[in-house]
Image (cartoon, rainbow, N blue to C red):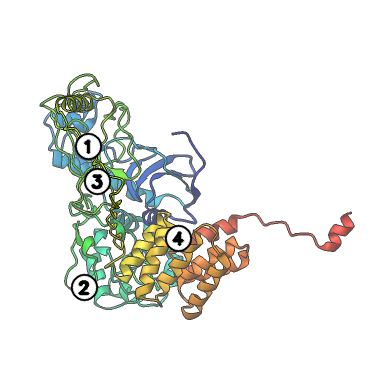
Amino acid sequence: MAEASATAEGELARTPLAHLLVYALDRRLTGAMFLATPDASETVIRLVRGVPVKVRPADRFALLGEMLIEAGAIDEATLQGALATQGLLGDVLLLAGRIERDVLEKVAEAQFVRRMVRLFSLPAGTVYRYHDGHDELAEHGGDPASVDPLALIWAGLREHGEASTMMDATLARLGEAALRLHPATSVTRFGLDAVEATMVEALATGPLSLAELGAAFTPEAARRLAYALAITRQIELGTGLMPAGLDSGPPSSMRPVSSVAPSTPPAARLSGTMGATANPAAATAVARMALRSTVHRLGAAAPDAPGDGERAPRRIREKRPSEAVTDEAAPVSSVEVVPPSAPAPSSGVVPTPPPVTMGAPPGAAPSSAPKPPGSAEEAAISDAATTLRSEIELPPAPPAPEVAASDPIVTTTPEATPEEADPFAGLSVPELFWLATEMVSDRDAVGAAEACAAGLRQAPDDPDLAALSAWAHAQLGAADLKALMVELDEILHAHEDHAEARYYRALLRRRLGDETGCVRDLERVAQLDPAHEGALRELGALEAKPPGKERPSLLERLFKR
């Protein structure tokens, strides 16, 4: 893909990696993020619907062969023999019977996690560039990894939380306020160890301040956990927003990071006091990766360097951004390239399962993969259909009845078309709000406005729905921005600390040319919600904007003449 201008760029000093990943998860971004350190080395992360699925480090960190030896799966002689074949390391070891598929799968996923976690320690001067829709790494290495993004974020903060330039500021804004878990918290997806799970259970039993949590456990562990809970919105911040990643809950076959990284303690499931507050979909674990013997997946981490087991380039069907590979794939005993004119093989090859859409509900049927035009199978079906049509003789159509001139003309009334079912029928107010939020993210302003209207019919005084409704209408063509400003003013008059209403008003003020009022609102939003990525991004953009030239006064214009 040709290099294009970046969709977003900046420094980790202003927006740390954890904040970038939360932002990507909220917006379900699909593209490539490039991280360039001050020494000019560059790491690439591939995102699919907000989830990191591939990473290519700038160096030879955590090579698969070294990790296999470290895990005791193979010895040095076996590794050197496999590398000498110049093939894909995992395939060679599997075909030679030197390693079990489950062992290789576990180490490959641990490689991906280890490489991602190290990125949280990158220096603050690292420059990031995100390119939406960029296909970098689309065909690199194996198939995409399937590690829970919340578990990745927590694994990175657990190891390198103090490297984040926003930790101190975020915790300072929390102050001495009691930390309350969000009713829809998905913290069970963090891959907590036993001590961390006990800390979360303590918060679930009763709200605790950061100082109280640190006194009960350790200050360092409490700081990192509170920071992670704040930026992923697992604690109530008074914004009305749902926890990050709630719409992309992991399928039941998924597992958290702690179960794939050998160096991380095993996860402890939360129960008892967490039962009433935990998100039901989030209590399940993050998905195992299936390895194929012919097209072997390597956890989406970059394989060893060329000549050390990296797969040769191959052409595959380009995946759409909304697609991802299936979690489980049947093993393939052999691969045979069939030209379009040749008949499809009858046995010996199990076709690769079709891709499914990431984020689809568990149990959803996978969509059929499109077949190449002109394939032998398509031609055979077309020929069979033509033959069938020629062999079947359809009865002639009955002649139209003759109508005498004196006969009355009888008209038949067409059947009434049944009214379309209300798409919002039966949905609760929180469900309608979440649906409207998703529609806004998908740029469906009309659908979002309708969902908000359905929710406001049930709860006319709901400030979350009212604020979101105003913002959805602002995205429509020929919107009356001044009238929508009045609506947001009324919401803020009744709910002064409503962060989202103030954020939407800031954006409308900027569109109306009131940058002073915009900055004032954005700064207030940052105080109310220290992890509000939208407010932080807009403030950064306004600070970076060069000051405009003041318009000359009337006397200055006259004297210039």
Q: CA distance from mark 2 to mark 1?
A: 70 Å
Q: Say which element carries label 2.
A: loop
Residue 503: mark: none
Amino acid found under the numbered disc labelled 3: Ala
Q: Nearer the viewer, residue 112 or 149?
A: 149
- Which x, y percent locates residue 274? 21, 71
What residue is disc 3 on?
A: 110
Amino acid found under the numbered disc labelled 2: Ala
For label 1, count other residues whose C-alpha is less than 10 Å away and answer few (under 14), some (14-19) or many (20+).
few
Residue 399: mark: 1
What residue is disc 2 on?
A: 276
Q: Are marks 4 and 1 in contact (CB under 8 Å)?
A: no
Displayed quadrant of residue 367: top left
Q: Say which element carries label 4.
A: helix
Q: Nearer the viewer, mark 4 or mark 1?
A: 1
For label 2, count other residues whose C-alpha is less than 10 Å away and answer few (under 14), some (14-19) or many (20+).
few
